[in-house]
Image (spheres, helix red, strand yellow):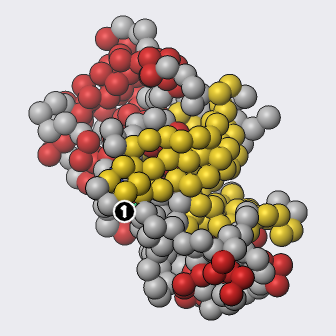
Amino acid sequence: MSLLEVSGLKMYYQTREGPVHAVDGISFTLEKGEILGLAGESGSGKSSIALTLLRLLPSNAQVLEGTVRLDGREIMTLSEEKLRREIRWKRISLISQAAMNALNPVFRVGDQIKEAILAHSDIDKDTAELKVKDLLTEVGIPPDRYSSYPHELSGGMKQRSIIAMALSLDPDIVIADEPTTALDVIVQAQILVLLRNLQRSKRMAMILITHDLSLVAEMCDEVAIIYGGEVVEYASASKIFHNPKHPYTIGLIKAFPNIVAKKSRLISIPGSPPDLIHLPVGCRFAPRCPYATSKCKSEKPELLEVEPSHLARCWYASDMHL
Ligand SMILES: Nc1ncnc2c1ncn2[C@@H]1O[C@H](COP(=O)(O)OP(=O)(O)OP(=O)(O)O)[C@@H](O)[C@H]1O
Ligand code: SF4
Ligand SMILES: [Mg+2]
């Protein structure tokens, strides 16, 4: 049994133009201590997957189907109260994409972390305060910064305190949604090293959401490439980078031959992502795919095993190579 098993997750956002099918049948598994990358270009549905897992979606969102099992226990059908008391923060925490802006400017940073701990556990205030100081030390912030207000901290320190908050209840899984995009390159690298060290020392599992392929190559064990609300390729990071089977992944890697280089590599190839309101009948990648045939335009490929533990959503996956 895997730590987390996500199966057939589907949700949409209701908009004036029609439903936006942001998550359209997503499945993956996460093992204890593993880092899974969810990688895809902007608008592919990555944050929506995270928000659906934790049911933190806005009011215009509707979850259609799917199961999410944590240690074999279905959590999609849990009441909001149970989810809040037993799962969020305690078992699965989220470093959200806009996390740095989520710090409340009028409260001291230490108190904000303390409140998060108090809201989700039974420990008393003094113990919580000591815990916050330990956490701050752990993420590389001097504990006397407990009393600082967010505007008194650098971007890197803000992000470190968000990480401290996400780890405050010793979760089994941390979902890190673009944890470094707002930071300059040097601070980005420091934060990533911090995240990885914490992940290892605490043996946490992590879902790393990013549109930066070099980050995936450096950090992840397994990778799901997301395109138009679907997984188009799913395998170990080494298979994804050395033997990709989906033309989208191949395009990305060819576009950036120096994939493991330190520079940030944004996921992008010519053309635009699919319209998630008016989805095409066939393969969603067909308009941008150099190998598209008439079959691709009329029949939708399923995500199938091309090689052992290597899935791809392409009619011709077994013929594809770098
Ligand atoms: N609240 C919302 N209402 C309507 N549509 C939304 C809403 N939030 C997201 N979407 C749409 O859902 C799709 C997926 O968005 P999502 O934010 O999950 O993508 P993403 O992969 O996280 O992108 P990015 O890399 O830019 O963060 C996009 O088409 C987006 O415009
Ligand atoms: S199914 Fe066809 S259009 Fe889609 S990725 Fe494969 S070759 Fe390209
Ligand atoms: Mg996002």
Q: Residue 226: which quarter of the image?
A: bottom right
Is residue 82 toward the left or the right of residue 96 in the image?
Answer: right
Q: Judge whether 151 appears above or below 93 on screen.
A: below
User: Which residue has dot 1 on it?
Assistant: 181
Element at label 1 = loop
Given residues 125 and 228, the one toward you in this image is: 228
Q: Judge whether 109 appears above or below 213 on screen.
A: above
Quarter in which the N terminus is drawn: top right
| Residue at the right extreme, as displayed | 308
Residue at 49% from the left image edge and 84% from the top image edge: 269
Residue at 76% from the left image edge and 77% from the top image edge: 315
For ligand 1, which image quadrant applies?
bottom left
- Three-letter amino acid code at disc 1? Thr
Picture coordinates of residue 65 (x, y %)? 59, 40
Quarter in which the C terminus is drawn: bottom right
Instruction: Mark yes or no: residue 130 visible.
Output: no
| Residue at the bottom extreme, as displayed | 290
Given residues 218 and 296, the one toward you in this image is: 296
Is residue 317 toward the left or the right of residue 247 in the image?
Answer: right
Given residues 273 and 172, the one toward you in this image is: 273
Callout 1 environment at 10 Å: few (<14), some (14 to 19), or many (20+)? some
Q: Residue 245: which quarter of the image?
A: bottom right
Q: Judge whether 4 appears above or below 96 on screen.
A: above
Residue at 44% from the left image edge and 17% from the top image edge: 81
Residue at 62% from the left image edge and 40% from the top image edge: 66
